[in-house]
Image (cartoon, helix red, strand yellow):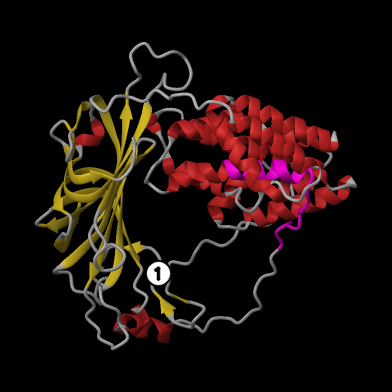
Amino acid sequence: MRQPALHTLAALLDRSLTQIAEAAADARTFDRRRIARVSDVWDNNTIGFVKAATVRPAWVGESFARRALRWMADFGVQRHAWVAESALAPGLLPPPPAPVSPDPAWDWNDDITPPWQQPLTADALTPYHLTDCRIVGFQAEYTGDHLHASIELGMRRRYETALLPHGGARLRLLLDGLTALDLTTHSSPRTDLEWRTGDGTVEVLLAPHGRLTAREVTLQNEDRFWHLSEAGIAAAAATPPRRRSLPRRDRRPYGFLGNGAAPLAARVVRRALMDMRFVRSAYGVEQQHVLALCRAFDGAGSAVLAAADRGEQGFRDLVLEWVERGSDPLARWFAETLRENWHGDGPTARWARELATGLHRRPVPPRPVGAPSGTAGLRQVMVEFDDRRTEGLPAEAAVHLAVPPLPGAADGAGSGWELLSVDFADFRQLHLTHEAFSTLAPLRRSRDALTLGTAFALHHGRPGGRP
C-alpha cells in the first residue's frame, strides 16, 4: 500500500470518532472515561495528520505521518496497543514502551516518590494516622457495565517537619468491581479508615459514614513529602540513583502554520475533539453535543485525504460539508470555531468570516430533554467536599442520570436514553446505596434535594449548573 502511515492516521481518526459515538450513544452505557481517553489522542496529533496529508511530494508527507504515528504510540502500553490495532503495515510503530514500574522512583527534583499505584496494605499506610481522616472527594461511576469508585482522603502524617503544609497528605483509594455500597455523609466528613479482605473482595469501612466492597482496591499516594518519611528514606537508600540523560527531543510534526483552508480545517476538527474531551470533567457533561459533533465529523480522516487531492477548494468544500451535517444545532458552534481559528486577512480568512457571519444568524433550535421527574437510572455521583483544594472552599457535587426516551419522541436527537447531567453548589448531604446504580427508580427534584427512590438522595443549597 502506498503511504501506509498516512492511511493509518486517517483510519485512526475515523475509528476514534466511531468509538466516541458508540460510547456516547446511550445514556445507560455512557462511557465518559473512554470518550475522554480517545479524544485526548488528537490534542497533539490532528495538526500533524493534516500536515502529512498535504505536504508534497508524497514521500515527505509519508515521512511526517510515520513520525506522527511513532510519537502518538509512545505514550504507554495501552496507547501503543490502541494505535497498533489500525496499523496497516509492519514496521510503522516502535516496540511497545516498558510498563510503568510499581517501585519507588526518583522525580526531577531528585526526591524519591512512592509507587503511583500499589495494593492497600498496612505497610503502605505506615507513615499516616488512620484515625480522624478527612474525606476530601468521592466518586462512584459506571463505565460500560463496570461500577467503580474512588475515595480521596486527607491523612495526618506520622512524621514531622517544618516544611509540611497544612491539610495533611492526599491519598486516593481506587475500588474496582464494586459489589456493595452504603454511604451517608455530610459536606465536611471525617472518618477512621479500616479495611478487611476475604473471599476475593476488599471491604473498606469509613466509620461512621458507611462501607464499600470491591473486588480490588489500590492506593494512589499523592503525598509530595513522602520522601521525608521513614519509608521514603529507606526507599531512597535502596533505589539506584536516577540515570542522567538529556531530555528527549520533541518529535511532534508541528510547524503547520498558514492561512489556507487546510490548516483551518485541521483546527476545526481539533476543536471538535477537544470539546468531546471536556467530558473528563464530571461537571456539565453534554451527551447530545458530543453526538452532534460525531455525526458532523464522521469519516473525517478519510475525508481529509480526499480533500488533500483537491487542494484549497477541497478543504473549503470539506468544511462546508461538516457545517451542513451539523445543521442548526451546531451552527453557532461552527461560527465561533471559525472566528477563533482564521488567521490573517487573505482569501480564506475572508471566506471563513462570511461563513461564520451567516451561521451566527441561524436560530438555535430547542432541544428536548427528559423531564426532571419520572423514572431514571443513576450513572455517576461525584462529590468534592469542603476544603477539597484549599481550606474554606464549599462542597460541590455532580450527578449523571440516564433518562428514558420522551413519550412520542421521533427518531434522532432526544429519541434514545439521554444523559441528564446536574451540577450542585453548596452540597450538604449524600445518601447512596448500591441499588441506586442497579435499578430504575422514581426521580424527584425539589428546591433543595434530588432523590432517586430510596437508594439515593442528595441535599443541596442551590443548583450549580443546568440539566
Mark 1 lies on residue = 115
**Can residue 258 be found in the magenta stretch?**
yes
Across and down, in percent, residue 64 comes to 78, 53
Left or right of 396: which side holds 258? right
Across and down, in percent, residue 136 comes to 25, 61
Residue placed at 65% from the left, 41% from the top?
A: 338
**Can residue 339 be found in the magenta stretch?**
no
Q: Quadrant of residue 124?
A: bottom left
Between 306 and 2, the residue placed more toward the observer is 306
Crowding around mark 1 (Cα neighbors within 10 Å: few <14, some 14 to 19, many 20+) is some
Q: Which quarter shows the C terminus? A: top left
Q: Which quarter shows the N terminus? A: top right
Q: Quadrant of residue 17?
A: top right
- Going by the picture, which residue comes out furthest to the top? 408
Across and down, in percent, residue 263 comes to 74, 46
Residue placed at 44% from the left, 13% from the top?
A: 410
Task: Please report the bounds of the magenta region as a residue range.
Answer: 251-272
Between 155 and 260, the residue placed more toward the observer is 260
